[in-house]
Amino acid sequence: METSEKLSYKDLVAGDIPPWVMRFVKASGKAINRYNMIKEGDEVLLAVSGGKDSLALALALSLRLRWLPVKYRLRALMINWIEHPIDEEHKAKLREYFECLGIEFEIMDENQFPSSFKGEFNCYLCSRNRRRILFEYAAANDVKLIAMGHHLDDLVETTMMNLCFRASFATMLPVQEFFDGKLHIIRPLIEIHESVTRRLADIYDLPVIKPVCPYDQTNIRARLKPIISELAHIDHLTREHIYNAHHFDLSL
């Protein structure tokens, strides 16, 4: 039952997990198993934006470890853009959150607009810059798996962007290989609706901090969201149909 007063995520960590949250955790585990994302002894770097999705991913992976026979290590990295820094209060809340989850957490200060951009800035350049930082950190710390909080809605929006504006039926992959297999990006929430991570953030006191983005409400992805919602009113499985149309390779 939803309430105006947020519940504590510490209740979830203590084992007071309602059925809908348990379904969320198990759904992330189902994707992990389906695509063989994480194996015994792996070290996984969580790419933390501070938004609801990456915090929900951290929660799911931490809770899942409590009853799994397979053990893996989690660590998390948040990039703090120097041009739009996170305040100390939110930093403290994030550190407390990850400490409660038992996940090593680090905040790294970086430039959102590096000199190499030559004054240009767009979603592609920002994403590429963020990925570069994550890759360099992973290489320096001998981490071969980076987990990102992309969910089903992200996949559908990416599919529609590529199909409608680039004449390509392509999207983000559940498991994406880089550098001849030396590094993989995994997306354990790829089969989960954004409404679930939103509900988690609405009901529980996840320390969500919205990253500053000058194109947050005007980029193509944001403009596609209501269109996809309209399609889902015609068929509530619209997102699942688009996901299944990709026929991802299960042998990864």
Image (spheres, helix red, strand yellow):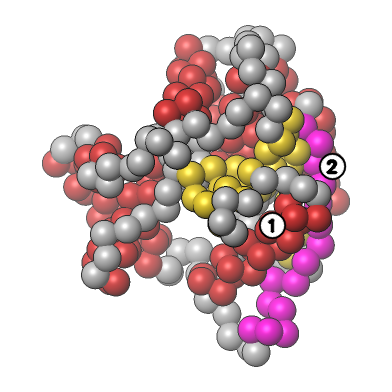
Q: Is residue 63 magenta?
A: no
Quadrant housing residue 126: bottom right
Q: CA distance from mark 1 to mark 2?
A: 22 Å
Q: Residue at x 24, y 70 (%)?
A: 167
In the rendered view, does 140 fall on the left or right side of 249? right
Magenta stretch bounds: 103-117
In the rendered view, does 187 fall on the left or right side of 77? left
What secondary structure is marked by label 1?
Answer: helix
In the rendered view, does 240 fall on the left or right side of 117? left
Q: How many marks?
A: 2
> Which residue is farthest left?
234
In this picture, is 98 found above or below 143?
above
- Marking on residue 85: none
Q: Position of residue 33 (x, y in %)?
A: 48, 26
Which residue was labeled with disc 1?
A: 134
Q: Residues within 10 Å of mark 2 (few under 14, many from 20)?
A: few
Q: Nearer the viewer, residue 54 or 162?
A: 162
Q: Position of residue 198 (x, y in %)?
A: 49, 37
Which residue was labeled with disc 2?
A: 92
